[in-house]
């Protein structure tokens, strides 16, 4: 079977920047996603189209194709009590912040007693990143998965 729209794909990945490994699924479970439903960077999804179990590929993505360009005006002031992930904050720490668009990862720039300045750019914004991918499993999506717009099961979304 080859990856096409509405395939449920399971793959291992390693994400690197300038040859430095940033994260990898190899020590845990492979990633699971529903192909053709905007759950992946478009260039990654395009490269995976037509691949089969056992195929390996290496991709390098420019910032515009990955986590986006850095936005210089992305510094915001928020109340410290809204930052999640630690009890005491220092500049450079990564926090989670609930927004109207859902949870967002931010980087603490400056912290005071009650307010903090945070950078809302993704930590990898403006960086060229590389992915090493290996396709582990492919199957047809169920009607429920297609209706819900995501894969179900280990590594995917469970209802």
Image: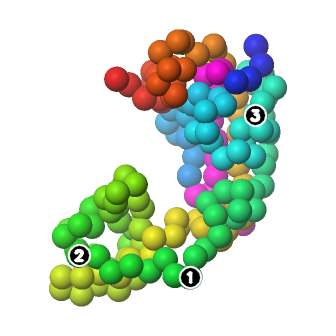
Asked if residue 136 lies left or right of residue 33, the reply is right
Query: Disc 1 or disc 3, which is closer to the eye?
Result: 1
Chain part drawn in magenta: 6-22
Q: CA distance from mark 1 to mark 3?
A: 33 Å
How far apart, in angstroms, are the residues tagged by discs 3 and 2? 42 Å
139 vs 49, left or right, is left
Image location (x, y in percent) of residue 144:
47, 15
For disc 3, the marked residue is 48
Numbered label attached to residue 79: 2
Image coords of residue 21 (percent x, y): 63, 57
Q: Main secondary structure of the magenta part?
A: strand
The residue labelled by disc 1 is 72
Q: Residue at x 77, y 38 (%)?
A: 46
Q: Are marks 2 and 1 in contact (CB under 8 Å)?
A: no
Which of 73/139 is in front? Answer: 73
Q: Residues within 10 Å of mark 2 (few under 14, many from 20)?
A: few
């Amino acid at each position: 079977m080859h990856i096409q729209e509405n395939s449920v794909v399971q793959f291992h990945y390693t994400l690197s920047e300038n040859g430095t490994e940033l994260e990898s699924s190899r020590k845990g479970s492979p990633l699971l996603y529903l192909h053709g439903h905007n759950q992946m960077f478009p260039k990654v999804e395009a490269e995976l189209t037509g691949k089969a179990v056992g195929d390996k590929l290496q991709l390098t993505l420019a910032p515009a194709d990955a986590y986006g360009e850095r936005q210089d005006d992305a510094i915001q002031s928020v109340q410290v009590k809204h930052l999640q992930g630690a009890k005491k904050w220092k500049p450079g720490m990564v926090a989670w912040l609930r927004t109207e668009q859902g949870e967002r990862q931010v980087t603490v720039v400056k912290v005071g007693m009650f307010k903090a300045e945070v950078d809302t750019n993704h930590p990898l914004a403006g960086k060229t990143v590389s992915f090493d991918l290996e396709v582990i499993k492919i199957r047809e999506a169920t009607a429920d998965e297609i209706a819900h717009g995501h894969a179900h099961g280990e590594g995917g979304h469970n209802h």
